[in-house]
Image (cartoon, helix red, strand yellow):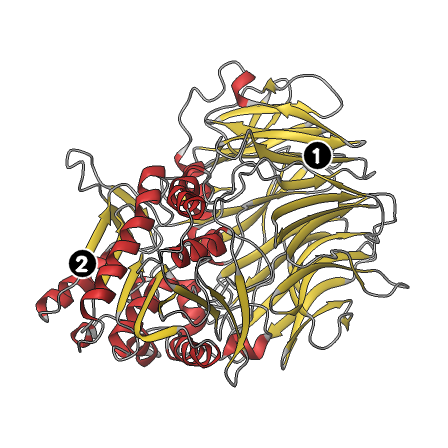
Amino acid sequence: MHSSTLTSEQSTNSADFPRQFARTRRFSLGVPRHFTVSPDGRRVLFVRTGSGTDPVGRLWQYEDGTERLLADPALLVGAGSGAVPEEERLRRERARERSVGVVSYATDEAARLVAFALSGALWAVRTDGGTPFSVPAAGPVVDPRPSPDGRYIAYVSRRCFHVVDLTGADRQLARAEDPETSYGLAEYAAAESMQRSRGYWWAPDSRHVLVARVDTSPVERRYLSDPADPAKPPQAIRYPAAGTANAEVTLELLSLEGERVEVEWDRKAYEYVVAAGWDAHGPIVTVQSRDQRTMRTLGVDPETGATEVLHERTDPAWVEIITGTPARTASGALVLPEDEGDTRYLTVGGQRVTPDGLQLCAVLGVEGERVLFAASDDPLETHVWCHEPGHDLRRLSREPGRYTGAARGGTVVLAGLTPRGNEVGVVRGDGGAGDGPYQALTSLAEEPSVTPRPVHLTLGERKLRGVLYLPSWHEEGTGKLPVLLDPYGGPSMQVVGRARGWFTCVSQWFAEQGFAVLTVDGRGTPNRGPAWDKTIHCDQLGPALEDQVDALRAAAAQCGDLDLARVAIRGWSFGGFLAAAAVLYHPAIFHAAVAGAPPTDMRMYDTHWKERFLGHPDEQPENYERTSLISHGHLLSRPLLLVHGLADDNVAVAHTLRFSAELLTAGKPHSVLPLPGATHLPADDAVNAQLLHFQRDFLMSALEGGADKN
């Protein structure tokens, strides 16, 4: 399958790539991230590891063109000596965090005091000089956050909510009543499926806190064991599978003096707490109905806990959650999304402020009446925009890519995944218009040893966005190449764009092995508007798989070197589900597949995510039957490799084991690769490096040995 024209340098780079991909944690190490801009715009805080292969995060400050190290775990006496609390480990798993050390932090309103946790110990540092100092805490610390005035630090320890001053005087404001309750933490469904990772919010007066209480006792219990270590006891987890009970989430207003007021709303009708916050206008909460067709923004009376409906959104399919909303401007105008037809608009005070075709992706921040947001008017790019009354709508990011950002005090931080990789720059002194002097923050990330060579395609009648990667050594017309589809294909993630990410590098590496690699974003993937999103309502499989088939045929019509007699498909998570479905339902088109962590039985996936697309399984069981692979294993007639981490608490390994058992009973040969100790995102560098080789070898063997067989 390899060409003799492959140069020695290309061969060496290609051979090194899997190890580089693993040791750089998908090229995420050494990249600046988690930005906070001070109110005057002079300082920018961020986290960055020590190099492109060093996983230890450090806290940095950029000021007057200079980067200064604020906190290095290696230099702090006693830091890292304890174990990471279980609650923190779960927070990192939900966030797919790949580093250690300082992985997150929080500041006071002035960005003068920074708090962070290291192995359960509470640390703080002042940004105007001095060294980091430890703050005594009542126990292992999770999610520490300073009060706006910088006098206190709130944190969670052993599921209890605490506030401590900088001398170590500690107050336990809420005590967990039993092992099933917690205060100040996000429940599983919120962190995994609602984009809410927090469980408490300070009031501007620094004397009150809005805190979530979570009771997981109604939630179905699962057990994670390690078959590679039979002496190790199993771990019990609470997992809200589709159609089963969710955690009971309530909110309380706590004062530093010990007063407690419960927030009141119809929790039976609106059981999901999607977002919360506390600004100058008071506490604000967003709740959602179980069927996700109604979402309400509630204003909260801080004295009584009574609520009033400030805004309501409805949708016959589901109401999409947009990160950063709701928010309020200084005048109290609500900042919200609004869906109509093919456009998701940004509204401020009930008025649309974005034009048709500009798709709102996230609200990044509000300062005064100015709103910073991410939006896309081209499915291949996402940019940072600014709305301010009296000014034209402004796009702040200029070059192609996918951008996010932060802004304050006339300074804008633009963090982009560009055709050159991750790039972060600070623009200051222009009133926030994005036209001032640009200063790049240093990235220590390694340069990939494989250079993607994307050929962008618009495919078929639905104008599907796709990218074709061909071997660098291949000359057009010199021979047919086997085809590898490399999609994700599901909600929340795009893999096609004018940007160099880890996924584009992996696709190019497979191309260098001798494949023509095609990646396609089909219906249901982000940034093509609400109508595009909702085409997968009640059927997450049919449209997604149809788009991969149509795109393959359209790409072959444009590129004559694609060999449709040898077609494989690989993917992870939703992409793994799509890969397995492809060889089940279209064996005449797809001749081999690798399915990593595939959710094969939709009833076993979580409530909020799966019921969003398929409804409640007791009310619409046909949607789950149509979309699940379970009970359809008898259709398999092509080589299939199933890969799954045995410690996966998101897509349980039961998905793969049950499907494999069904295939065996039906007499359908297949392969299973279990990964002991691996979660949904395998962390072992050696495993991650070898996984690429293993998939390549399986697919090559499958295509060479039986692509023409039925």
**Residue 79 position within the rendered picture, expressed as x and y whole percent measured from the top left:** 50, 20
> The N terminus lies in which quarter of the figure?
bottom left
Give the residue type at disc 1: Asp
> Residue at the location (64% across, 71% down)?
312
Q: Nearer the viewer, residue 525 or 222?
A: 525
Left or right: residue 566 versus residue 114 is: left
Q: Residue furthest toward the bottom? A: 461
- Asked if residue 243 shows in the view, the reply is no
Left or right: residue 604 versus residue 358 is: left
> Residue at the location (69% across, 76% down)?
357
Question: Viewer-nearest of labels 2 and 1?
Answer: 2
Q: Nearer the viewer, residue 98 or 209?
A: 98
> Residue at the location (76% across, 23% down)?
128
User: For the residue labelled by badge 2, is the local secondary structure a helix, a strand or a loop?
Assistant: strand
Q: Are marks 2 and 1 in contact (CB under 8 Å)?
A: no
Q: Which mark is residue 573?
A: none
Q: Residues within 10 Å of mark 2 (few under 14, many from 20)?
A: few
**Residue 255 position within the rendered picture, expressed as x and y whole percent measured from the top left:** 64, 38
Q: Which residue is tagged 2?
A: 671
Cα–Cα gap, marks 2 and 1: 53 Å
Give the residue type at disc 2: Ser
Q: Residue furthest toward the top? A: 77
Q: Which mark is residue 108?
A: 1
Q: Nearer the viewer, residue 425 or 158?
A: 425
**Residue 335 position within the rendered picture, expressed as x and y whole percent measured from the top left:** 72, 62
**Residue 328 position within the rendered picture, expressed as x and y whole percent measured from the top left:** 74, 57
Nearer the N terminus, badge 2 or badge 1? Answer: 1
- Quarter of the figure with residue 487: bottom left
- Asked if residue 308 shows in the view, the reply is yes
Left or right: residue 353 versus residue 485 is: right
